[in-house]
Image: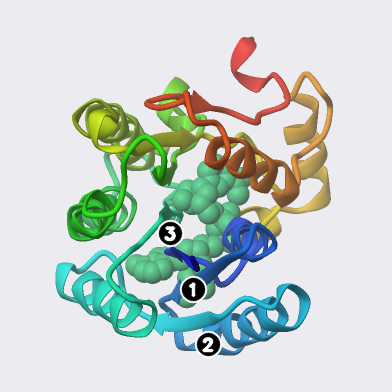
Amino acid sequence: MAKTAIITGGSRGIGEALSMKLGEMGYNVVINYRSASSKALSDAIAEKLVKEYGVEALVVKADVSKYEDCEALVKAAVDRFGDKIDVLVNNAGITNNCNWIDITREAYENVINTNLMSFLHMTHLVLPYMINHSDKDHQCCIINTASVGGLTGVINQADYCASKSGVIGLSRALALEFASRGVRVNVIAPGMIMTDMLRGVNQDELNALAATIPEGYIGDVADIAGAMEYLLTAPYVTGQVISPNGGFVLQ
Ligand code: NAP
């Protein structure tokens, strides 16, 4: 029977790699994006998924920081692929880089709404479509993208770190609540990964960042896709945080 996965923020960066990996694993993929400029990127991923893996793909524009948009996203998925959602990947995220004196309320609320509230909205809306179909022989999975910032703290990113720690707490609680109903919930907490989030940084700064990582280099989106593949195929793993970070959090 066909399997369906929804990914938020699937248009670029880590999300693009996760969208492609979901297709490679045989899921029909619902790719969410927010900015008008990302429609073409999302359409191109959808086309590639169909061509390379023979799965179906649906592109849905939604600002997942808003509950109503999340409702519309889930409805679009159910209308197209039916009322069984096998996988939800909450990946959409943004950062701020500002000290806690100068930051505006609007800026930090935006980070919390995008990085944490969207995860609450999406899990709340999708879980009913999982528990009706899941049991120990057919597990459904939620993968939530956090960050090493949610494990360690980062200067000038208090809002980001708060959102990512919140994601870890949410995931552990949901893992406990839904373990007996065949839904596993796990977290990927990436270290530094080369995406648009880091593309504004100049080469000297990138070299300096790489020097802070024990493995000596900035990670690739494929490292996160590999972690997701493991979590989706590990039946006895729930409520865990897996952190591909080159040893960054060991120091
Ligand atoms: P990115 O390249 O900036 O992509 C962000 C994605 O999130 C885009 O698809 C964007 O959609 C989407 N998005 C942002 N706000 C949204 C909203 N309100 N509604 C729907 N979609 C929204 O970021 P990335 O580096 O791939 O990061 C992906 C995730 O990994 C984030 O949760 C981030 O916090 C986490 N992470 C990244 C790193 C890193 O070093 N890159 C490290 C740790 C954790 P549009 O294309 O439409 O804007």
Residue 158 appears in the picture as rendered: no
Near-viewer residue (237 or 38): 237
Distance CA(mark 1)–CA(mark 3): 11 Å
Residue type at mark 1 is Ile
Q: Within the image, what quadrant is residue 227 found in?
A: top right
- Looking at marks 1 and 3 on the same chain, the residue that comes earlier in the sequence is marked by 1
At 46% from the left and 73% from the top, the residue drawn is 30
Looking at the image, residue 168 lies above or below residue 140: above
Mark 1 or mark 3, whichever is nearer to me: 1
For label 2, the residue is 39
| Mark linked to residue 92 | 3
Q: Residue furthest top?
A: 251
State the residue at coordinates (75%, 83%): 51
Disc 2 residue type (three-letter): Lys
Residue 220 image position (x, y, % from top left)? 75, 47
- Disc 2 is placed on an element classified as helix
Would you name the residue on which mark 1 appears? 31
